Image (spheres, rainbow, N blue to C red):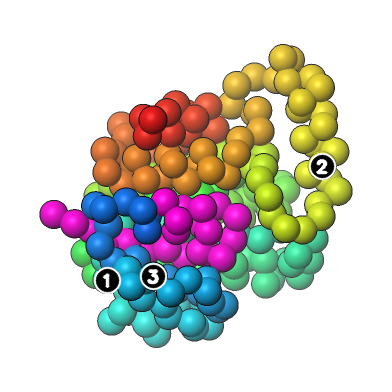
Amino acid sequence: MKKTAIILGATGLTGSILLEMLLEDSSFEKIKLFSRSSAENKSPKIEEHLIDMFQLEDYSEAFKADVVFCCIGTTKSKTPNKETYKKIDYGIPVTAAKLAKQNGISTFIVISALGADENSSVFYNKTKGEMQRDVLKQHIENTYILQPSLIVGDRGESRLGEKVATLFMKTFGFLIPKKYKMIKAETIAEAMVVLAKQGFPKQQITSDEIKQIAIKTN
């Protein structure tokens, strides 16, 4: 049976790649996009909802599918205000998970981060950890939390910190454990598609495991 997917964050780096993959995948017949800005794609498979993402709960009637892909995320440089940051990186994914549970959606896949830890003293790691905790509390049948290391790809913007980290990893990559090595956004998107179709025995999936899952698309 063909699937309907929801993507949150389809205009971001990983989300935009995931969207293209799903458009080409015949097992997905409809893709619902929830976003504040348009993905500017006129495919007949797309059903686009341009909304205030902080009011996602108001759109529960439209929030129905077989699988939710949550690619929402921001950065400290983009969102320096901690309250707004938490509304994005914690509030949106957790609200989406609650809606998924409410509407009987059986698969929920969300991108977190490798350092996520609800007990961390670092605000950003703590926020991701709290998000993971409260997504898991929804007890959605197939919940997968991806914990990538540094995500690389063509963002169409300059990030000095990312460039420095990428150069370091390329130079000293042989010294870095597998789960800390940088990962391509395309690899994450590939793994998300595989998880939606085949599942995985673990709910929390690290970078090295994401890479292994993505290989199954080839």
Q: Of the residues under marks 1 and 2, which one precedes in the sequence?
A: 1
Q: Residue furthest top?
A: 174
Residue under pointer 1: 64
Q: Which residues are magenta?
A: 1-21
**Quadrant where the N terminus lies?**
bottom left
In percent of width and height, residue 129 lies at: 56, 49
Q: Residue furthest left?
A: 1
**The label number, if any, that marks residue 163 in the structure image:** 2
Mark 3 to mark 2: distance in Å?
A: 34 Å
Identify the element where label 3 is drawn: loop
- 105 horizontally vs 179: left or right: left
Q: Of the residues under marks 3 and 2, which one precedes in the sequence?
A: 3
* Residue at the (57%, 44%) spot, across then down: 185
Q: Nearer the viewer, residue 6 or 101?
A: 6
Per the image, is 62 magenta? Answer: no
Residue under pointer 3: 43
Eye-nearest disc, 1 or 3? 3
* Residue at the (26%, 53%) spot, across then down: 26
Eye-nearest disc, 3 or 2? 3
Per the image, is 18 magenta? Answer: yes
Q: Amino acid at mark 1?
A: Lys
In percent of width and height, residue 209 lies at: 47, 28
